[in-house]
Image (cartoon, rainbow, N blue to C red):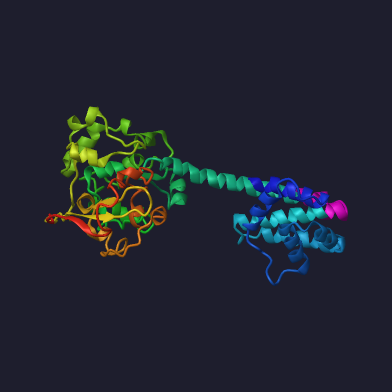
Amino acid sequence: MYRTSNNVLMNHLFLNGSKKHGVTTLLLILLVFSDLCGAGEKDFRKQFITNYKTFQFGAQEKLVKGTSARHMQAEIRTLVDEAMTTNKDYTDRLYMLDVANAMASAYQHWHGDIKALTKEIEKLIKAELKQEEIRVAKLMRWKKEERFLGNFVMKDHMAEMEQAGVAPVIYPHWVHRIWFECKVCHQDIFAMNRWRNKVSHQKIESGKQCGVCHDGKMVFGVKDKGQCTKCHIAGKPEAEKLHHTDKIDHARIKQVAERVGAEWNIENLPEGKVPVDKFGFINWLNLKENGVFKPIHSLREGFAHEVRDNKILFKSKGKIDDVIFDHKVHSNWINCSSCHPEIFRETTTNDVKMIRMSKGKFCGYCHGKVSFTFADCKRCHNQKKGAGKAGVIIHQGAAQ
């Protein structure tokens, strides 16, 4: 939204030949945009943009005065036409319109009145800004729906859903986690990567993906059209129950748990409430320790529940305490193949850094997405510094 106000200020600076009032800020803003002056562009446009970006006021005045009105009008019109071609993205389009607006202002100051063209450009800029507002609003709408850790809005097929008159699906990891260990779905049914699975109703109805469980026997079936609104609730009031643990339907959770072979022991809940950490996210270890729930390990008969029981020390390079990674805690939830070797090599050569985790690497593959966030530093950094050698197994138990 700053583009229009910056352009007005920029035009003021050109017309008055002054470098005061926010030149440093404007320079930083302008330098982030792509230099669209390719070798095929006319010398006038290239020189105008160079002067515009580097605040060469005297050179700009000389350039504009030395260029014919006819040439400038043609250049402005060409810029506008190029900006509005369909193969331009929002940033490039707005940048070119911004340059065209600057040219039109300079023309009007030194050559004469072209108010009609100036108004046309300003109208196009406002329209682009409005479209971007709408696009951002749509994105933020689904971000709001995903505010509870692990909730995913499945919106890959928005056009089809809008045509059918249904809202997108919210998949609540946290609800399913009560009944199933993560390893039940990952990697056998779903790759542990949000965008890799290409979820579709056709696959689900054929008994794949969500249809493995939602078959009308274990859980309500996806072919039953009367059940659509149980999942297609993103953006609707019904979705509120997926954003707040205090709105959990304990009776339904327990009923489903008994049906699938899991447990949900409401009587063991601390103070009758689902325990959450200081950020408002469920404390799953607390739930397990108190025997509140017991999810199933697999849908397959004869499944061997493998638990790796050892701990590895990761030394912190800063002042914060070291980290002990407990394999037993993690392998209770997920299969070894979920992390090894794609996320972690089974050696001590993994260059684990917080900056990489924040970008979804290493521990960041799950933490901050479906498991507790990095903001809870002491949850992991709780081992006094100097307790051992980095990467060395400091505890070894028997595999289960």
Residue pictured at 23% horizontal, 38% vertical: 286
Is 302 magenta? The answer is no
Q: Nearer the viewer, residue 79 or 386?
A: 386
The structure residue drawn at horizontal position 65% and vertical position 60%, both measured from the top left corner, is 85
Left or right, residue 197 beside residue 11: left
Q: Residue at x 24, y 32 (%)?
A: 250
Report the quarter where the C terminus lies.
bottom left
Say how many tags the image has.
Answer: 0
- Asked if residue 294 lies left or right of residue 362, the reply is left
* Magenta stretch bounds: 107-119
Residue 288 appears anywhere in the view: yes
- Residue furthest to the front in view is 386
* Left-right relation of 40 to 141: right
Image location of residue 2, percent across then percent down: 65, 46
The answer to whether residue 6 is left or right of residue 368 is: right
Tell me where residue 137 appears, x and y as whole percent: 53, 43
Q: Visible in this render: residue 207?
A: no
Picture quadrant where residue 260 is located: top left
The residue furthest top is 271
Screen quadrant of the N terminus: top right
Residue lying furthest bottom: 39
Q: Splitting the image into 4 quarters, where does residue 75 fall?
A: bottom right
Magenta-drawn stretch, dominant element (helix, strand or loop): helix
Residue 290, compared with residue 369, is above or below; it is above
Q: Is residue 118 magenta?
A: yes
Q: Residue at x 83, y 55 (%)?
A: 107
Q: Which of the 4 image quarters holds residue 65?
A: bottom right
The image position of residue 31, as x and y in percent, is 65, 57
Q: Of 361 and 376, which appears nearest the observer?
A: 376
Q: Position of residue 311 (x, y in %)?
A: 21, 54
